[in-house]
Each structure stands twice: as structure tokens, then as C-alpha cells.
Amino acid sequence: MTFDEIRIRMERGKTRRKPDDAEHRLQAGCVQWFRLQYPDYAHSLFAVPNGGRRDKATGARLKAEGVVAGVADLILLRQSKGYGALLIEMKTKAGRQAASQRDWQRKVERDGYRYVVCRSLEEFMDAVRDYLV
């Protein structure tokens, strides 16, 4: 592709930044660690595929099926320390919660759930250990 072809594509708005998968890699590593560390609870930790790019029709179908904006990325469905579950939002070091995520966090904390934001494997490990021990 020539410089002129790139310039023309940019002018037409047809270029798209490649999605950064750092948060995906972080979350996948955390889930892998959890399943190795707590094999008896492996079934209790699951992802909520709320994010990602979708067309309007798929988004409407998911919303009709019960998808809720702001839900945490991971849910550990185990009661511990008086909480009903541990809800984990994964973020990169630079990532920030959306308004819908902060709103959902306030609601579920009010309802008796533990909510954490983890930005590294170490933070995830600490949060899980603290919750389960």
C-alpha cells in the first residue's frame, strides 16, 4: 500500500485502530492462575462477556436477553466473609471504569457483594486470597 492509498483511506475514515488486547491477556492469565490455584472452585469463577464491539442488532438481542451495562468482567460465585460473591472488574494500568460500571458497582456493593478493580495479576491474586481465606 502506498502513502497516497493510506492517506485516502484515512480521509474516508476507513482505517480502524487495532484493538488492544492487554486487558484480555490480563484477564486470561488471572483465570488461568485461579483454576490452577483453586481447582475445586474452578466452576465458580466465570466471565461475563458484556464488552466488545457488536452491531446494533446483536446489541439489541443481548439487551433483550438480559445483558446489563456495567457488569463486572469476572464473577466468583462463592459466599465468603459475609459477601454473596466477589465481582472483579479487570482494567489495565491506564484503564478507567465507565460511568455504567461505577453505577453498577455502587448498586451491587449496596446489595452485599464484594467488588474489586484489578489492574495486575498480583492485585487479582491478593483480592482472591483475601476473599477466600
Image: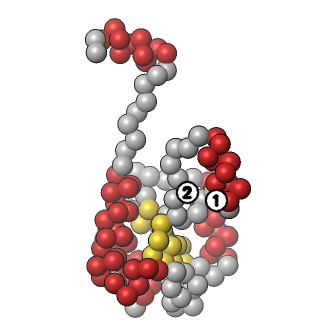
Label drawn at residue 124: none
Q: Residue at x 68, y 48 (%)?
A: 60
Q: Residue 41 versus residue 111: which sits nearer the camera?
A: 41
What colour scheme does the image use? secondary structure
Q: Does residue 103 appear in this view?
A: no
* Quadrant for the N terminus in the image: top left
Residue at the top extreme, as displayed? 4
Q: Which residue is mark 2?
A: 50
Tell me if label 1 and label 2 are in contact, CB under 8 Å. Answer: yes
Q: Helix or strand or loop: what does disc 1 sit on?
A: loop
Direction from residue 25 to residue 87 in the image, left or right: right
Quadrant housing residue 39: bottom left
Residue 27 in picture, x, y percent from top left:
38, 62
Q: Nearer the viewer, residue 77 or 84?
A: 77
The residue under the point 35% across, 63% down is: 28
Residue 12: percent from left, percent from top: 49, 15
Does 43 appear above or below 92?
A: below
**Is 84 above or below relative to 50?**
below
Q: Residue at x 46, y 22 (%)?
A: 14
Amino acid on which the number 2 mark rests in the picture: Asn
Front residue of this view, candidates 122 and 74: 74
Disc on the earlier residue, 1 or 2? 2
Q: Residue at x 31, y 70 (%)?
A: 32
- x%, y% of residue 47? 48, 66
Q: Which residue is mark 1?
A: 67
Q: Is residue 78 left or right of residue 1?
A: right
Instruction: Give the residue type that dot 1 points to.
Output: Val
In the rendered image, is residue 78 in sight?
Answer: yes
Q: In x, y percent, where is residue 53?
A: 52, 44
